[in-house]
Image (spheres, grey):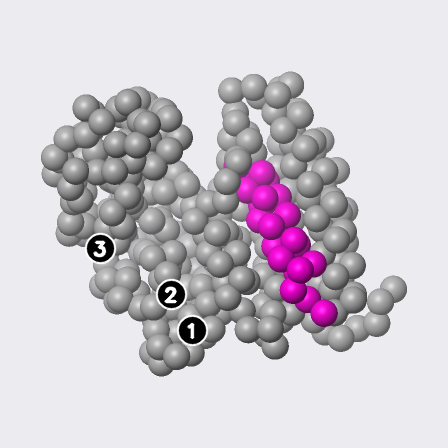
Amino acid sequence: MSNCGHGTTVNRVTPGSKGCQECLETGGWWVHLRLCRSCGHVGCCDDSPSRHATAHFRATHHPIIEGYDPPEGWGWCFVDEEFVDLPDRRRNWGRSRASSELARGNRGLHRSVSRPQYGGPPMLRLLLAGAACTMLLAACNQPETAPEPVDKAQDMASAAVGQASAVADATTVTGYATGTGTGDLYEIQSAQIAIEQSKNDRLQRLAKAILTEHTASNTALRAALNQVAPDTPAPTTLDERRQGLIDNLRSAAPANFDTTWLDQQIAAHREALALQRAFANQDSPLAAHARAEIPKIEAHLREAEAIKAGQPAN
């Protein structure tokens, strides 16, 4: 099992629920499911608002989970922070019909939003998740030779999930650090791609500003965490949702790249702005970081919206 030393904790488990156990109990919702291979607990992934799989690990120290919605064939060790090979995979017998249909689509629809079969989520989240599923299912009807409608639907679904996640992230230091740090990493990578691929001078200038300022933001966040929350690690890799955005950017046709990038930037900066504004008034030393980032994010958002609308530069 790679270099992981926790293979002896992997058991042949029976999944404990037909979805995220805690979300089903509270009426929450999830993006992906993760199965604990020590005890069979089913929890939601770190893209989901409540991140119950990670919470289960912290409470039990059960180290290895399996990607479980749909079964993806990989394991992850929380302790060693690396992928591991699993001796078997468990069949997810609790997927919703929408999730099953989406799993049969092309070009990575495992990044879609899944809604629980039981226990209705709050109305706002229900509407967001339902809209995301509708967009993705519609995109699946496109022919295999036209993948970009699927990518566009994924990006739109990501925007809906991101807005809801931003509100949840702002309630804890860990959530804020994860949301902000992962957002910075996405902005850095997406800006680098734009600098390489776009032929639009104004978009290039925005991408360079985003690269510079989000790199500085990520550095400042890490320094602040070391001082005020040393037990809260800053993210070092993209989550699945944002990795999907990067994949879609890289696969965009040259004629569509600028529009794809701008749409992603507008959605990502709206998400970041919601997170920073919500956290700025928290009783936390990191609130100062949030307040410092708000004007920069607002400026990036205004410029991205202006470029898309064809407005002249200020």
Report the magenta stretch's main SS.
helix
Secondary structure of the residue carrying numbered label 3: loop
Mark 3 Cα shell of 10 Å, populated few (<14), some (14-19), many (≥20): many
Q: Is residue 2 left or right of residue 208?
A: left
> Quadrant of residue 191 in the image?
bottom right
Residue at left offset 34%, top offset 37%? 83
- Front-most of residues 258 and 27: 258
Q: Which label belongs to residue 1?
A: none
Residue at left offset 58%, top offset 38%? 181
Distance from Cα at disc 1 to Cα at disc 2: 7 Å
Secondary structure of the residue carrying numbered label 1: loop
Q: Which residue is mark 1?
A: 147
> Residue 311 location in percent, x, y?
79, 73
Q: Which residues are magenta?
A: 178-199
Distance from Cα at disc 3 to Cα at disc 1: 24 Å
Q: Is residue 266 left or right of residue 33?
A: right
Nearer to us: label 3 or label 2: 2
Q: Are marks 3 and 2 in contact (CB under 8 Å)?
A: no
Looking at marks 1 and 2 on the same chain, the residue that comes earlier in the sequence is marked by 2
Q: Which residue is mark 3?
A: 95
Distance from Cα at disc 3 to Cα at disc 2: 20 Å
Q: Amino acid at mark 2?
A: Arg
The residue at the far front in this view is 2
